[in-house]
């Protein structure tokens, strides 16, 4: 994955990674920190770090995660994409593109949007 920068070569790793509470385990957080990736993962209520209040959680960055979740939900409305009927990646990519175009057209010509 290439992330373009204003100057210099593009970055190969993200600055932060968002996940839900299922990914709130210490070894995953340590692995991310060792690669200088900031974890944006809420702590579980039964974790010691949550009770101590010694961790910082970026709520603004976590809210951007819902965009990805909603997009995946919209894509899975198309049964062919949700069950991955296509064997070739080229065909699957084409169907995802077609589903996104259909979603955009639905939003564009909807009277409620």
Image (cartoon, rainbow, N blue to C red):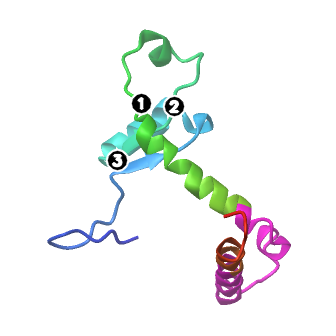
Image location of residue 40, percent across then percent down: 44, 40
Give the CA distance from mark 3 to mark 1.
Answer: 14 Å
Q: Which one is closest to the eye, mark 3 or mark 2?
A: 2
Q: Is residue 113 above or below residue 36?
A: below
Marker disc for residue 38 = none
Image location of residue 63, percent across then percent down: 50, 43
Q: Secondary structure at mark 1?
A: loop
Q: Secondary structure at mark 2?
A: loop
Residue at x 62% of width, y 36% of height: 22
Majority secondary structure of magenta residues: helix
Q: Is residue 59 above or below residue 51?
A: below
| Residue that mark 1 sits on | 57
Q: Quadrant of the N terminus?
A: bottom left
Q: Which one is closest to the eye, mark 3 or mark 1?
A: 1
Q: Are marks 1 and 2 in contact (CB under 8 Å)?
A: yes
Give the CA distance from mark 1 to mark 2.
Answer: 7 Å
Q: Residues within 10 Å of mark 2 (few under 14, many from 20)?
A: many
Q: Which residues are magenta?
A: 74-101
Marker disc for residue 42 = 2
| Residue that mark 3 sits on | 37
């Amino acid at each position: 994955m290439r992330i373009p920068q204003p100057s210099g070569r593009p970055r190969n790793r993200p600055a932060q990674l968002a996940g839900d509470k299922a990914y709130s385990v210490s070894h995953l957080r340590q692995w991310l920190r060792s690669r200088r990736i900031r974890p944006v993962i809420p702590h579980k209520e039964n974790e010691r770090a949550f009770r101590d209040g010694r961790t910082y959680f970026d709520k603004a960055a976590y809210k951007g995660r819902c965009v990805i979740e909603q997009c995946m939900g919209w894509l899975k409305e198309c049964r062919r994409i949700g069950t991955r009927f296509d064997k070739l990646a080229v065909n699957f990519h084409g169907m995802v593109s077609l589903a996104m175009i259909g979603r955009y057209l639905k939003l564009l010509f909807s009277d409620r949007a």
